[in-house]
Image: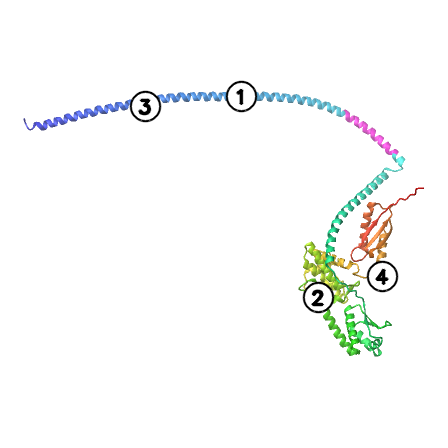
Amino acid sequence: MNWWLYPVIGIVALLSGFLVGYAYRRNVAEAKVAKAEDAVKKLYDDAQRKAEEIKKEKILEAKEEVFKIRSEAERENRERRGEIQRNERRIFQREEILDKKTDSLDKREAALANREAEIEGVEQSVKALYDQQIHELEKISSLSMEDARNMLLANVERETRHEAALLIRDIESKTKEEADKRARNIITLAIQRCAADHVAEATVSVVALPNDDMKGRIIGREGRNIRALETATGVDLIIDDTPEAVILSSFDPVRREVARIALEKLILDGRIHPTRIEEMVEKARKEVDTTIREAGEAAVLEVGVNGLHHEIVRYLGRMKYRTSYGQNVLRHSIEVAHLAGIMAAELGANVALAKRAGLLHDLGKSIDHEVEGSHAQIGADLAKKFRENNAIIHAIMAHHGDVEPQTVEAILVQAADAISAARPGARRETLESYIKRLEKLEEIANSFDGVETSFAIQAGREIRIIVKPDRVNDSDTVILAKDIAKRIEGELEYPGQIKVSVIRETRTVDYAK
């Protein structure tokens, strides 16, 4: 065999293999394409079938929805037709009722018109009868219409006054009961806790002498000693027939005390001449000044007031020798301070302020014989001069009502002053002024209409009025008591308060025979 055949055979085999492989792959590819076309066709058929099914379902659902909507619309239409029918029936019934009411109102209106006409006729008859009766009553009673009206108004006024008096008495009794109870407790507690001694001072002092021969030595040759003593002290010496006594007279208690001490020292010394008199008077004056300072300091310490100016303390000490209606002014001021402080504590007010104002309220009395004006004004000026609190100055000014009290402490000082002055035995009055005040008190009470008699009792602290029972009734007694109290307040000056008691009594007496 030829060698060249081998390559040719190889090439032919290779071509043959390639053709066979190509045919095979083509067949395989065609098979796959056919298979894929079958699968696509199947999928298309399935999709078309599902689409038909969905379409049928949607059409069915749409038909059901349309049916449902149609049924709902028909139902609503039926309901609306039923509601309309019911409304029509209701309107028809209302129209029938309104027609009936209109007929009834027409009938009633006609009846009322007839009734009104009848009433008008009756009114005319009544008016005529009333006029006739009024005429007959005026003829019988001998009173005109105006007189009867005035009588009726008088009766109404009397009844109104009676009711007003009852109301006033009821309100006053309740208010006074509570206020008196509260005030009584506070004042009683204050008085119980405040016990002060009172020294009665007069305008004269009596100096005891060892013997009557001393009178001549006091007078001296041609009256030189007595003139020197009177000149040095400003006090009048009364030497009369009183055995073993010399009377010193002066309205200035400080001068009188200086004269008393000086005279006692001269009597003990035995050497009585003008020069010695001047020396003893000077020593007595220094001793009295010391006593005044100590008295002022003791008062301040007793009350518990701090920070007072030393001049104010001295003025307080001067009040040791000052009296008012027989009441020692310094002891009175201390008592007022205690009372005001205790009442302030009970009421929750400023205790320190109340005590300070109470102690200083009569400060002006220490120099009221030297300075013009009321002691309240003088005391306020002194307090202002030494830079006291405005509240203290106001309380001093207001304690006698010279100005209206604006603070609780000022009112308490005013009340404490009245309590101290009105305490039994605290003050003395002359018999003449005492009798005049009682007579004036009874005169005021007797001046009122319906008063039978009156009696001033309890040292002028109470006035009892007996009224005529046929002229004054029980209700009028309340008003009468208030009127008398107001009249007393306006016309009399007195310490404390005066109780007005109106008594009405009706007695019926008969005898069995």
At label 1, the amino acid type is Asn
Q: Quadrant of residue 248?
A: bottom right
Mark 3 Cα-neighbour bin, 10 Å: few <14, some 14–19, many ≥20: few
Q: Is residue 132 magenta?
A: yes
Q: Is residue 220 above or below residue 496?
A: below
Q: Earlier in the sequence, mark 3 or mark 1?
A: 3
Q: Which residue is depicted at the point 23% across and 23% down?
A: 30
Label ID, residue 431:
4
Between the C-alphas of marks 1 and 4, the distance is: 119 Å
Residue designated by label 2 = 298
Foreground mark, 2 or 3? 2
Which x, y percent locates residue 270?
A: 79, 78
Foreground mark, 1 or 4? 4
Q: Are marks 1 and 2 in contact (CB under 8 Å)?
A: no
Q: Quadrant of residue 60?
A: top left
Q: Earlier in the sequence, mark 2 or mark 3?
A: 3
- The magenta segment is 114-136
> The residue tagged with tag 1: helix, strand or loop?
helix
Foreground mark, 4 or 2? 2
Which x, y percent locates residue 403?
A: 73, 57
Q: Earlier in the sequence, mark 4 or mark 2?
A: 2
Residue designated by label 1 = 77
